[in-house]
Image: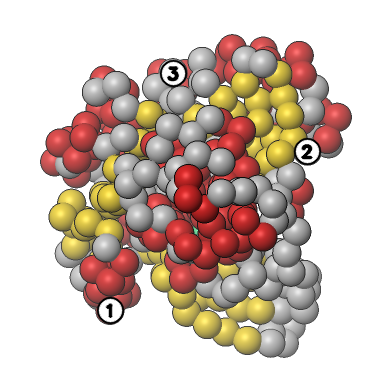
């Protein structure tokens, strides 16, 4: 595996405080169910991906909005501690910081209720103010927890500057062809892939080579990478489709695994890594993140990721880092 370089990653995305409950199973409608634990973690797809990149020693810039409240303060402190540049993070005076309510069952799988609050105020003007940072980044990553016009504007700036654009289309929101045409790498999970393209979650459908090639052609993306949880990822590009397995681990909390994947993928691609290798590295980052609790706190560090890749036989020679 090639070296991870100190590339520049810009993230236009969300801040969400996760109020996490653990339950043996999800409650049925009308049922009161005793949970087993509660914790508050910093999260939100945007900042999770920025921290994931920064922990792999990328130069990470975050663009978004927090509220003028204690959750917002925690994010500003965390960005300083994590070395994420927050020069273009606005403290919104009207809306509070975004809130997420992940419900995690005994298998470690999750469902999340998301209340965007200040994230809904991220505007095209906010993005324009950060133009220089976006133009200067090797890779821009955007998700869909913000008004879609803001993510779209960021993608347009990056594309016009000849930068690589990653769209993690989560949570699902319809996206127009004009936005899609700006995207180099599209990363949905299997549910979002079904919502976006109508590809069923069945493996035969996801691994249908002719379908994959025509989807890649239709979208104009260099590749579509569908994350499929513990089974790794499905890489679709002009050559066809292949499944790239993830290392197997004991999951305790899967919240943020997709963000660990996307953050690591951006750093790998920004380092010039070949696409299948970038997906392999991103799979490993996602796998490591599910072995501990919380979203943002679970993002792996660079040394830890390299050790893990060596242990699982995916990286042979540390000196080539
Ligand atoms: O991708 C995981 C994140 O999505 C969580 O941190 C939660 O806040 C939701 O926004």
Mark 3: give few (<14), some (14-19) or many (20+) Cα within 10 Å.
some
User: N-terminal of the two: label 2 or label 3?
Assistant: 3
Return the x and y of residue 18 as percentages of the image width and height.
Answer: 48, 70
The residue tagged with tag 2: helix, strand or loop?
A: loop
Distance (Cα) linking label 2 and label 1 = 40 Å
Q: Residue at x 46, y 71 (%)?
A: 297
- Mark 2 C-beta to ligand 1 under 8 Å: no
Return the x and y of residue 300 as percentages of the image width and height.
Answer: 50, 63
Compared across the picture, whether 273 is left or right of 254 comes to left
Marks 3 & 1, CB-CB < 8 Å contact: no
Depth check: give the residue in front, 303 or 142: 303
Mark whose residue sits in front, 3 or 1: 3
Labelled disc at residue 201: 2
Depth check: give the residue in front, 82 or 134: 82
- Mark 1 C-beta to ligand 1 under 8 Å: no
Query: In this figure, which residue is indicated by the disc labeled 3?
Result: 181
Mark 1: give few (<14), some (14-19) or many (20+) Cα within 10 Å.
few
User: How many labels, in total?
Assistant: 3
Q: Residue at x 21, y 32 (%)?
A: 135
Query: In this figure, which residue is indicated by the disc labeled 1?
Result: 70
Q: Quadrant of the N terminus?
A: top right
The residue tagged with tag 3: helix, strand or loop?
A: loop
Marks 2 & 3, CB-CB < 8 Å contact: no
Compared across the picture, whether 101 is left or right of 33 comes to left
Return the x and y of residue 203 as percentages of the image width and height.
Answer: 83, 35
From this viewpoint, is residue 31 visible?
A: no
Distance (Cα) linking label 3 and label 1 = 39 Å
Q: Residue at x 18, y 51 (%)?
A: 88
Return the x and y of residue 5 as percentages of the image width and height.
Answer: 37, 44
């Amino acid at each position: 595996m090639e070296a991870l370089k100190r590339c520049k990653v810009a993230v236009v995305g969300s801040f969400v405080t996760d109020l996490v409950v653990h339950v043996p199973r999800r409650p049925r409608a009308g049922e009161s169910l005793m949970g087993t634990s509660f914790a508050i973690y910093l999260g939100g797809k945007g900042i999770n991906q920025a921290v994931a990149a920064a922990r792999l020693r990328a130069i990470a810039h975050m663009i978004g909005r927090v509220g003028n409240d204690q959750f917002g303060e925690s994010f500003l402190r965390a960005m300083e501690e994590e070395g994420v540049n927050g020069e273009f993070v606005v403290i919104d005076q009207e809306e509070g910081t975004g809130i997420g309510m992940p419900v995690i069952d005994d298998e470690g799988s999750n469902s999340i209720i998301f209340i965007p609050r200040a994230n809904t105020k991220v505007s095209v003007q906010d993005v324009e103010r950060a133009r220089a940072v976006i133009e200067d980044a090797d890779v821009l990553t955007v998700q869909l927890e913000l008004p879609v016009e803001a993510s779209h504007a960021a993608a347009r700036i990056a594309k016009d500057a000849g930068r690589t654009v990653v769209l993690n289309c989560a949570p699902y929101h319809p996206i127009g062809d004009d936005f899609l045409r700006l995207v180099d790498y599209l990363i949905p999970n299997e549910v979002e892939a079904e919502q976006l393209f109508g590809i069923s979650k069945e493996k035969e459908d996801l691994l249908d080579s002719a379908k994959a090639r025509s989807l890649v052609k239709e979208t104009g993306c260099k590749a579509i990478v569908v994350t499929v949880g513990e089974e790794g990822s499905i890489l679709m590009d002009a050559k066809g489709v292949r499944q790239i397995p993830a290392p197997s681990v004991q999951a305790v909390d899967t919240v943020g695994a997709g963000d660990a994947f996307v953050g690591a993928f951006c750093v790998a691609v920004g380092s010039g890594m070949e696409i299948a290798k970038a997906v392999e590295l991103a799979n490993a980052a996602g796998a490591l993140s599910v072995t501990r609790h919380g979203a943002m706190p679970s993002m792996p560090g660079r040394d830890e990721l390299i050790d893990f890749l060596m242990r699982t036989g995916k990286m042979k020679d540390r000196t080539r880092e």
